Amino acid sequence: MDHEPPRTSTNSSMSIFPFSGLCKRRSVAVSASAKELPNPNNHSSGSEAVNGSDDNRDSKVYPQPFDKPQITHHPKCSEEAMPKLFDAITALKYAYVQLQQAHLPYIPKKIKLADEVMVSVLQALSDLEETYRSQSSLSLEIQQHEDLLAQLQSKLRIKDLEMRRLRCEKEKLDAENAALEKVVKQKLLPKKHFYLNQEMSPALFLNVFELAAKSIHEFAKPLISLMKASGWDLDLAVRSLYNSVTFAERSHKKYAFEAYLSQVMLSPAPLEDERFSVDQFDGVMNSQDPFDYLIADPDSQFGRFCRSRFALAVPSKMEDSFFGNLDQRSFVLSGRHPRTPFYQAFVAMARWAWALQVMANSFVPKAEMFYAKNGQEFTKEYMEDVVGGLVSNREMKPVVGFTVTPGFRIASTIVPCRVYSYKTKSSTNNLRLDFVV
């Protein structure tokens, strides 16, 4: 009686470990008489060979037991792959037994059929192996990418920590800068000095005069820097202002530009209808930023003052050389105030110049402004040297080169003008002051 091959699953879709060595050749134990091939002329023997008894087959066929393969689970092994692998191995065992049984007795049809089954099962295992190899290669590539991803994530965490540290430092610096800016603004704008209920005294005027001179000095710095960057010949510009003055040091030429700004900002502008009343004084001087007041009221007294004096202080040729256009000028002359760093710096200077003239007009009688003439002998009562350290002697007398900031006379009180002086052997002894009405 022939044994039917067991029904097994040969579906193979993936592999999880190599299958080399699973199908080793097995020896088949037979009796001595069975080793002789049947004689085709001997019908009886042929009949016995074909119709061999079940007992004879049972006693002569000894399939060797299969060794259980060692299975190593791959880290990427899935639950669906293992049953397919075990089914394929089981089918291989039964196909091998069926192939052995087909040889005793020798039945060609059964041998062919068993051989086809054996080949089919081996092909299924081969497909599983190929799938495993492909998946192993893909798993290795995935693992490499995962390792790279882990490295990048680690670097990202380090960068994130660095960004947090820098952000904390930035916040700390911003807080410190805000505190410093507050201190600077408080120093530049001592609010308690400018309430209208405080009397406009010569002492208060002197305080404003010093702040105005300082603001002109501060604005001259970016103006000179822009002139240098724009290719201006500073020596030629100074000679066009004060050709006869001898400067003790090259750095002293900056006072010529300060003098130019003082004349523009403090002298009465020609053909200009300006009013310097105290109506808006409190609002302008108590604003944390004078530019905020301009935005709130662009056509105020202070706003008109800024527009007219900007056009005089920064001529169109100069502005065009600085910025390559006249956009700021057009914006200002149209009645508006551009929020640019340069114009904001100008407004900071203009506030003190405007405040000084408002206070000068508030006195009864009005404060008189005066300038010292070039070549006049230096007089301490009416003048203050911007450089300092002048010592007169019989041979060399200090004389006025030019007035940097004009002086004021309030009744019997004199606020000295600030002048640049140099020494010469001859000088004019008569005091000559140009008063501006």
Image (spheres, rainbow, N blue to C red):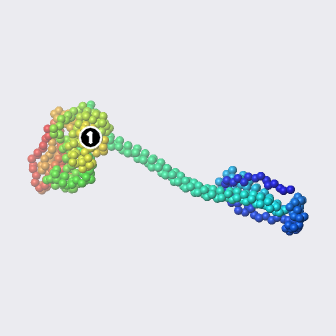
Secondary structure at numbered mark 1: helix
Q: Residue at x 72, y 63 (%)?
A: 21
- The image shows residue 382, relative to residue 102, as above or below, that is above
Residue 220 on image: x %, y %: 24, 48
Please give the name of the residue rendered at 15% of the width and 50% of the height, measured from the top-left corner. Answer: 400
Residue closest to the eye, 398 or 181: 181
Where residue 319 appears, x then y in whole percent?
Answer: 24, 47
Q: In this view, does 22 lie to the left or right of 427?
A: right
Above or below for 24 versus 388: below
Identify the amino acid type marked 1. Answer: Phe
Residue 204 in picture, x, y percent from top left: 24, 37
Residue 341 visible in the picture: yes
| Closer to the camera in the image, 124 or 279 | 124
Residue at x 88%, y 58% (from the top left corner) = 54
Front in this rendered view, residue 264 or 359? 264
Q: In which quarter of the image is residue 356?
A: top left
Please identify the quarter of the rendering in which residue 40 is found: bottom right
Q: Is residue 217 left or right of residue 68?
A: left
Task: Tell me the quarter of the image containing the C terminus.
Answer: top left
Crowdedness near tag 1: few (<14), some (14–19) or many (≥20) residues, C-alpha within 10 Å: few
Which quadrant of the rendered structure holds the N terminus? bottom right
Q: Is residue 157 above or below residue 279?
A: below
Q: Where is residue 107 in the image (x, y as percent from the top left)?
A: 82, 61
326 and 318: which is toward the camera? 326
Q: Tell me what residue is drawn at x 55 percent, y 56 percent.
A: 148
Q: Mark 1 points at which residue?
A: 331
